Image (tube, rainbow, N blue to C red):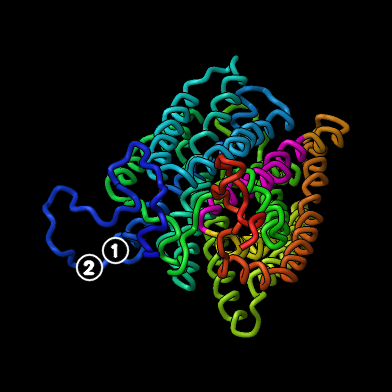
Amino acid sequence: MSRTDVSADTTPFFSDDNEGEGPTDNGVGSPQPEEEESASGVSDRRAKVTVIVLCYINLLNYMDRFTVAGVLPDIEQFFSISDGKSGLLQTVFICSYMFLAPLFGYLGDRCNRKSIMCVGIFFWSLVTLASSFIGKEHFWALLLTRGLVGVGEASYSTIAPTIIADLFVKETRTNMLSIFYFAIPVGSGMGYIVGSKVNDVAGDWHWALRVTPGLGLLAVFLLFFVVQEPKRGAIEAHPEHTLHRTSWMTDIKALCRNPSFILSTFGFTTVAFVTGSLALWAPAFLFRAGVFTGEKQPCLKVPCDNSDSVIFGIITVVTGILGVASGVQASKKLRTRTSRADPLVCAAGLLLAAPFLYLSIMFAQASTVATYVFIFLGETFLSMNWAVVADMLLYVVIPTRRSTAEAFQIVLSHLLGDAISPYLIGVVSDSIKKSDSYMWEFRSLQMSLLLCSFVAVVGGAFFLATALFIEQDRHLAENYVPSDDAPIIVPKRGRSTKVPVSSVLI
């Protein structure tokens, strides 16, 4: 069979890309292309531009997600809410994001991915803008809009990595994924920085939420006119057979029988738990530490002192870049010695992050400088996982199941990770707090954040377990042959019936 058959069953979805039908002339006639297209149907230059656009959208995605954390003290003061309710802001977003991920994963494996992302990002931009006009008496409305933001982000996060996977293979794919995942820490850090700075200039935290919607509309424009939909799995398909889509339930059963995918997903869940906790609570914790030590004044009226959000944002950007780059490079070098390099690097990152996160929490009352140094080291090691985990998923899962796998991983990692961790940390803090004094506001949050170090150690254990199965599961994915149990029609007592191939003696 020819490679062009790989995506013959792809369904166009409000798109002019004609996925699976080869290159189009885009209305300019049909001369010979200047640059030869790969099996994906996208030229090398167009593929690299696509990664840049996807990276920009991913950066914007995380920038919006953590803008709220950058102005959290102002939001708490504005609505007069407790730590538990503050944690809900992140939890409701992650919950909607998590529960909708399977839907978009299902659609991403069957419909035009570019169109899905365009609709999702446009909706997300409108809802984010609407959330910036909520008044003091309607905290529930802020929770609702933050939840709806998850709809748009779920449509993007489950699909974008699979497009990169269909454009590149092997080391090039790893490099492109590392560029894509650089946007997570950089966007997160920019969320803190932009949110707090806009709040300082405008004197109103609402304006911090009005930055990303305009950039989101630009993202929709770039996505629609620049990104080209690649053919699913064509760049890595075997010439002797075609990958056919199977039912959603068949995909889920196959993923559940993939130990490398399941164990690495649990490992990534611990990463999500720790990063979700730190993302929302670290700036507030550092602010309370400053109040406790007398270095800062309490926030009695908005705008509050958000200098810790700016510093933490800068640390997040720098450590994210260093962590992702060092994780990818360490994996590449270790691959020359063992094919189990990826899960071992992820395990090392979490096990090294745990003690530094513990020290950063315990030193907050003694030395601000030491606290920032330990946070820097802890977040650097924590960030080593992002690109490596994504690469593992892509090479242990066949192309026609990748969006579903991304959705499955998003659901599980968020369900047990950052969907519950911000709220859990807030609730534990409230339960430990014995009074409303500044000392107990600091101490209670300090004790609750220590949970992050323990969870990081558990995550390291999951990745060590993944190393036991990674070679076998990668081999199975790379040499996958469609099941012989696809229904065929055979005669039975004068009429035709569908039976599995395995039930027919040949």
User: Circle 1 sits in a helix, a strand or a loop, which is it?
Assistant: loop
Q: Is residue 456 visible?
A: yes
Question: Disc 2 marks which residue?
Answer: 35
Name of the residue lying farthest toward the bottom: 337
Q: Position of residue 180 (x, y in %)?
A: 47, 58
Q: CA distance from mark 1 to mark 2?
A: 6 Å
Quarter of the image where the N terminus is located: bottom left
Q: Quadrant of residue 350?
A: bottom right
Q: Which residues are magenta?
A: 399-426
400 drawn magenta: yes
Query: Residue at position x 58%, y 17% from top?
Result: 136
Q: Is residue 341 left or right of residue 16?
A: right
> From what the image shows, is residue 403 above or below residue 359?
above
Q: Position of residue 53 (x, y in %)?
A: 36, 52
Label 1 close to label 2 by CB (< 8 Å): yes
The amino acid beneath tag 2 is Glu
Q: Nearer the viewer, residue 109 or 201?
A: 109
Quarter of the image where the C terminus is located: bottom right
Q: Quadrant of residue 458?
A: bottom right
> From what the image shows, is residue 492 above or below residue 453?
above
Q: Nearer the viewer, residue 221 or 214?
A: 221
Question: Disc 1 marks which residue?
Answer: 43
Q: Nearer the viewer, residue 47 or 87?
A: 47
Q: Position of residue 444 (x, y in %)?
A: 82, 40
Q: Is residue 85 left or right of residue 177?
A: right
Mark 1 or 2, nearer chain start: 2
